[in-house]
Image: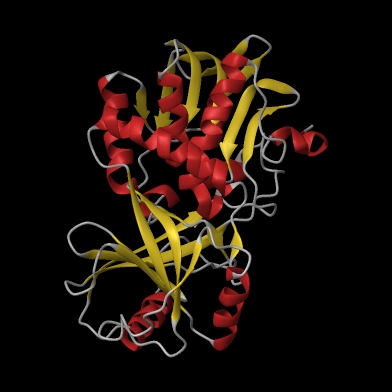
């Protein structure tokens, strides 16, 4: 098989990159093992314009959202399923300090933050002592349906090879790359945590962390809203809610833990005033990095080996934006955002 591009991985990055490549005349194949507990397949798909305890606006969020809205409409038209839904987040303050931080940030950031006059609105559903504010707009990206639907498109067009990628079978020269029976002009890695073991990228400042989440059922909580009080309740289909997530920097493996289950169940019991049932418990390792900026572009000394990775918890907003930048770079000689371009690690990568 001979193609222009090999894409390794079909998580959120590989999906968007292959989507934009499909709009060109280029030929490509995606190699992916369909790992069920990859970070893309266990995430809730939350896109939050502010972040952290200090309620700071997310990096380049206006540009990300502007692109995401257009891209999601186009992808929805192609797949015939919902891709992006707009929500608001009710942020219940767990402490007086968090309330003060929100109110202080509200003075200068009224585009995404809102004061709520009716502080008793949710007392029948939730236990809270310090009130709440609103983050609006927020979005949910429909990861659980979009990734399989795009995978079916790849299968139907003979663009998917379902297997584990083995870096030992990759060779490259000035003319291109080859992998088993596939020859290509370039290869781009969108394979999440696997890139940390990749000899070409292992020196990048990856900072993987483990996240766990529960899936609960509750018929009484409105599914029009995301709720937050230390942990997050994000509505899914059929009166289900994704509940999470934590950040573990020291962990033994990628499996769900009893410690998280017990702790989160107790948090829910203290917070919710309505019945709920735990129906699933998931865990995955996120491809984050120390700089909190993506890795996008080609190796400075091997122009046919590239990467689109390192999105961390912001993959649903970052991946479509930078996948489009990558494809524009390939075909229109445009530039990649300087803070995301992997060329910033030129000395390390060489």
Decide if residue 154 is in sight here.
yes
Determine whether 121 is above or below 210 in the image.
below
Residue most toward the bottom?
129
* Point 67% across, 35% down: residue: 337
Determine whether 254 is above or below 195 in the image.
below
Q: Is residue 349 left or right of residue 191?
A: right
* Point 41% across, 63% down: residue: 255
Decide if residue 11 is in sight here.
no
Q: Can you give x and y, in whole percent of width and height, for residue 165 in the image?
A: 47, 33
Is 148 or 57 nearer to us in this picture? 57
Q: Can you give x and y, in whole percent of width and height, for residue 295 in the image?
A: 63, 39
Determine whether 32 is above or below 96 in the image.
above
* Point 25% across, 22% down: residue: 156
Is the N terminus in the top left, top right, bottom left or bottom right quadrant? top left
Q: Can you give x and y, in whole percent of width and height, for residue 234 in the image?
A: 34, 63
Is the C terminus in the top left, top right, bottom left or bottom right quadrant? top right
Is 172 or 101 nearer to us in this picture? 101
Dividing the picture into quadrants, the one containing residue 100 is bottom right
Q: Can you give x and y, in whole percent of width and height, for residue 231 in the image?
A: 43, 73
């Amino acid at each position: 098989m001979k193609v222009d591009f090999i894409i390794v991985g079909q998580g959120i990055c590989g999906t968007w990159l292959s989507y934009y490549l499909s709009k060109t005349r280029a030929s490509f194949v995606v190699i992916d093992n369909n790992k069920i507990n990859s970070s893309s397949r266990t995430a809730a798909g939350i896109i939050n314009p502010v972040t952290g305890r200090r309620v700071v606006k997310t990096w380049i969020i206006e540009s990300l959202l502007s692109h995401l809205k257009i891209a999601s409409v186009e992808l929805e038209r192609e797949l015939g399923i919902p891709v992006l839904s707009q929500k608001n987040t009710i942020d219940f303050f767990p402490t007086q300090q968090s309330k003060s931080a929100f109110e202080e940030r509200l003075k200068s950031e009224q585009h995404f933050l809102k004061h709520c006059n009716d502080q008793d609105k949710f007392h029948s559903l939730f236990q809270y002592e310090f009130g709440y504010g609103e983050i609006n707009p927020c979005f949910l990206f429909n990861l659980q349906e979009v990734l399989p639907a795009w995978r079916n498109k790849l299968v139907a067009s003979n663009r998917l090879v379902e297997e584990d990628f083995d870096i030992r079978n990759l060779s490259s020269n000035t003319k291109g790359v080859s992998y088993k029976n596939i020859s290509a002009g370039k290869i781009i890695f969108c394979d999440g945590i696997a890139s940390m073991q990749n000899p070409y990228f292992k020196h990048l400042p990856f900072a993987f962390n483990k996240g766990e989440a529960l899936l609960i059922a509750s018929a009484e909580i409105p599914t029009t809203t995301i709720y937050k009080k230390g942990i997050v309740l994000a509505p899914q289909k059929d009166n289900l809610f994704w509940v999470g997530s934590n950040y573990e920097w020291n962990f033994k493996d990628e499996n769900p833990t009893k410690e998280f289950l017990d702790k989160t169940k107790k948090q829910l019991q203290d917070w919710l005033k309505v019945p709920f049932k735990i129906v699933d418990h998931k865990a995955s390792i996120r491809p984050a990095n120390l700089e909190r900026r993506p890795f996008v572009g080609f190796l400075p000394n091997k122009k046919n080996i590239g990467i689109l990775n390192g999105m961390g918890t912001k993959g649903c907003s970052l991946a479509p934006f930078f996948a489009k930048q990558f494809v524009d770079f390939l075909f229109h000689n445009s530039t990649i955002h300087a803070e995301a371009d992997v060329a910033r690690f030129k000395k390390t990568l060489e």
